[in-house]
Every structure is written in C-alpha cells, then in structure tokens.
Image (cartoon, rainbow, N blue to C red):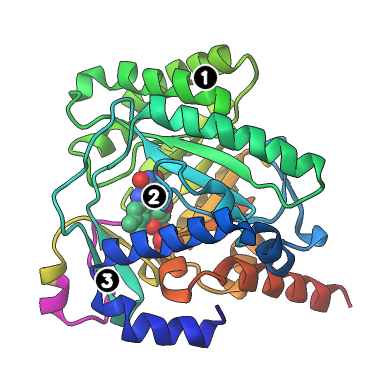
C-alpha cells in the first residue's frame, strides 16, 4: 500500500480504532496474504538491494534496517514481516512462563507526536511455545536461503516473567536463554522495559554482570555455538550508567548493546497535556526519542571497541534518519513506532532511500 493510501486508511479507519485491535487486524491480514502466496510477490517489490548487505555480529544482514522487539512477541509472523523488506526481525520480549500482560487498554497513540505509549507488560506465549514456532521458521528460512530468496536474520529478546521476584531473575532468564538460544541468530537480554516492576534495576552493573555471565554460558551451551549476546538499555539511564554498561560489555567481551528502549519521560511532546495524561503510564516511543537515542549512540560508539555492535533504535522514520544513525556509528538500526504511522511499505521505502543515498554519495 503506497504511503498516501496508508495515511488515508490510518486517518479514516485505524486511528479511530483501539490501537491493539488495529495491530491485530493488520498482522492477521499480512499473515493471511502470506499464506495465500503473496510472499514472493511482495518480496519482488520489497527485497533489499544487494548493496545494502551488512556484516554484523558475525552474520550477513540483508539490510542494516530491522524491526525492533515488541511487534512480533510470539514469533507468529516472522516471514510475513520479512517479506516487507526488514533485514532482521527481533522477536519478543519472550519470558520463561507464558503471561497475559497488563489489563487493556495498554497501547495508546499520541498522533500529534507520531508517538505511542505502551504498558503491554510482556504479554507472550512463553519460551517453550515460541521455541517451537521459531524452529519451524528456522527451517523455512533455510529453504528461502537455498532458493536464493530474501531471508531475514532473527533475533530473540528475552525478559523476566512478572510473577518471578527480582531475586529469582537470573534463573528465570536462564530458562528462556536455554530454551531459545538454539533457535536464535542473536539473543538480547532486555533489562530496560518500564512495564515490568523492578526490571530496570537489573541495569545496575552489580546485578547485570552475573545475569549476563550466566545467560552467556547457558545460551552457548544450549545452542552448541557462540550465540551473539546483546543487552538492551533504556534512554532514561544517566550518562555515567550508560558508560558503566559499555565498560561491562567490553570487560565481558559481549557482542553489543541495543539503545534504546522506550522512555518513562513525557517531556518534549506536542500533544496537549490532558491527552498525554489520559494516555497513562508506560513507555513512550517515536520521534520524541531521537535526541537521547542519538546521544547514547554517539557515547557508546566512542567508548566501545570497534568490533562491539551498537544497534540504534528510537524514533527513526525516514531513510535519512537511518543513514544518520549509521553515520554516527550504528552497526544496525531498528524501528517500531514508524511502522504503525508509515504503514506496511515502511521498510521498503527505507531500503530504497538508503540505496539512493549511497548511490548519490558514490557518484
Ligand atoms: C507497543 C510496543 C511494544 C514494545 N515491546 C517491547 C518489548 O517487548 N521488548 C523490547 O525490548 N522493546 C519493546 N518495545 C520497544 C521497541 O523495541 C523500541 O525499542 C522503542 O519503541 C523505540 O523505537 P521506536 O521509536 O522506533 O518505536 C516496544 C515498543 C512498542 C511501541
């Protein structure tokens, strides 16, 4: 669907609908289209140009641009989403135990800011079920590769089960890591969601060190290979804490950092205060994150060894935004909220724009 058509549909239909319901309708439609055989056709339109191939985390990504965690929490739509042109899909957050998440409504749009507020609370089917789905997806991806078709990299983002107390967090993450690492191209330890009470305390170095050490041992042992391991951080960390995480990642020889998750701040918004208050608590995402996300990217790139990946996420909308992050030193770039506002051909437009930008700087 071209951008003006989607924007019309968004204004007239989706924006009047509960955002979570709209999400389900769009994803169900996409999965149905895929099942009816639209995959190869879509791919012809959207597959990233070969010039966008990016080496990162010891793998070749078809494009530097991917879909951030949270959109496909249960690995239900990996291939349909990949057929829209994303170079990688990060599924999750998955927790060891299945859980329903917070009561609805838990996803709100702030249209004036092209932003979202979410307090989903890691609603997901749990590690065992997601592993089964991903095992099937992995086999399908291998077939795509053999056929020379667009095949995404699949990351798996893990978090803590809500009912497990913070003292039991390491064991809980270990269950997820052991279950999911064998079907993950890379693994992300999410300690930055604002919607699981206490989770962000795990960003403290003294809590993070033993957690990451244990997850790395467990995931490599379960998968029988070196599984690239990254940690995802919040934009609300102060600079000294960002530096401390960077130093820990360096000390432990981890593979990378994803920056950033959503923010609990509400500053910098254009939406009326009453609307912001009505949206309620949770994590804010979209262009309002741009400045802090870029600051953290630059800070991390400065402090980390070159071979440690930084995946930049937070507020990107256009190909120029993605190109800017890459110029600032991002290894890869992700987005989520832009997908909701820009529509199904978002990744395709970004890939096309990136290719054109590269072409114009070369010629
Ligand atoms: C509805 C929604 C759900 C999300 N769920 C997760 C999640 O489960 N795990 C996670 O690590 N990040 C989650 N995120 C955060 C995104 O992955 C991303 O870090 C953040 O939204 C900033 O990027 P954006 O401005 O492009 O959306 C979620 C974001 C949104 C909007």
Q: Position of residue 134 (x, y in %)?
A: 52, 33
Q: Is residue 240 visible?
A: no
The residue at the point 25 percent across, 50 percent down is 120
Q: Is residue 131 magenta?
A: no
| Distance CA(mark 1)–CA(mark 2) | 21 Å
Q: Magenta region: which residues?
A: 263-276
**For residue 286, above or below residue 118:** below
Q: Gap in Å between the C-alphas at discs 1 and 3?
A: 37 Å
Marker disc for residue 70: 2
Secondary structure, mark 1, is helix
Q: Look at mark 3 in the image and give the residue it sits on.
A: 109
Identify the residue under disc 1: 219
Task: Confirm or reject: label 1 Cβ below 8 Å from ligand 1.
Answer: no
Marks 1 and 2 in Cβ contact (< 8 Å): no
- Give the residue displayed 57% in from the left and 32% down from the top: 136
Q: Residue at x 38, y 18 (%)?
A: 175
Left or right of 236 on screen, residue 157: right
Q: Which mark's residue is nearer the viewer, 1 or 2?
A: 2
- Residue extending furthest toward the front: 36
Establish whether ligand 1 lies closer than 8 Å to the Cβ of label 2.
yes
For marks 2 and 3 on the same chain, the one whose residue lies earlier in the sequence = 2
User: From the viewer's perspective, is residue 136 above or below residue 252?
Assistant: below
Chain-order first, disc 1 or disc 2: 2
- Quarter holding the N terminus is bottom right
């Amino acid at each position: 669907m071209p951008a003006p058509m989607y924007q019309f549909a968004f204004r007239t239909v989706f924006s009047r609908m509960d955002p979570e319901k709209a999400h389900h309708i769009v994803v169900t439609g996409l999965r149905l289209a895929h099942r009816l055989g639209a995959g190869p056709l879509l791919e012809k339109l959207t597959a990233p140009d070969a010039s966008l191939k990016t080496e990162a985390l010891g793998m070749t990504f078809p494009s530097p641009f991917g879909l951030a965690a949270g959109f496909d929490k249960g690995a239900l739509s990996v291939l349909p989403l990949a057929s829209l042109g994303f170079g990688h899909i990060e599924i999750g957050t998955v927790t060891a135990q299945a859980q329903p998440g917070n009561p609805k409504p838990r996803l709100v749009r702030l249209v004036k800011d092209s932003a979202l507020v979410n307090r989903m609370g890691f609603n997901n089917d749990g590690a065992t079920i997601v592993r089964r789905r991903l095992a099937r997806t992995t086999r399908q991806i291998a077939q795509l590769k053999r056929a020379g078709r667009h095949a995404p990299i699949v990351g798996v983002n893990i978090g803590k089960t809500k009912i497990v107390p913070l003292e039991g967090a390491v064991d809980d993450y270990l269950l997820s890591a052991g279950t999911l690492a064998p079907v993950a191209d890379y693994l992300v330890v999410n300690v930055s969601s604002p919607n699981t009470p206490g989770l962000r305390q795990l960003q403290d170095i003294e809590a993070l060190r033993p957690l990451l050490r244990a997850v790395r041992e467990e995931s490599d042992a379960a998968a029988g290979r070196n599984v690239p391991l990254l940690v995802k951080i919040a934009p609300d960390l102060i600079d000294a804490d960002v530096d401390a995480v960077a130093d820990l990642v360096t000390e432990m020889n981890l593979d990378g950092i994803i920056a950033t998750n959503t923010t609990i701040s509400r500053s910098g918004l254009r939406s009326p205060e009453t609307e912001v208050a009505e949206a309620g608590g949770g994590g804010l995402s979209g262009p309002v994150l741009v400045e802090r996300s870029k600051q953290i990217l630059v800070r991390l790139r400065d402090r980390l060894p070159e071979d440690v990946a930084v995946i930049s996420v937070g507020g990107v909308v256009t190909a120029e935004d993605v190109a800017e992050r890459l110029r600032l030193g991002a290894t890869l770039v992700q987005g989520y909220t832009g997908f909701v506002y820009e529509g199904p051909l978002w990744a395709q437009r970004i890939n096309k724009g990136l290719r054109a930008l590269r072409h114009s700087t070369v010629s």
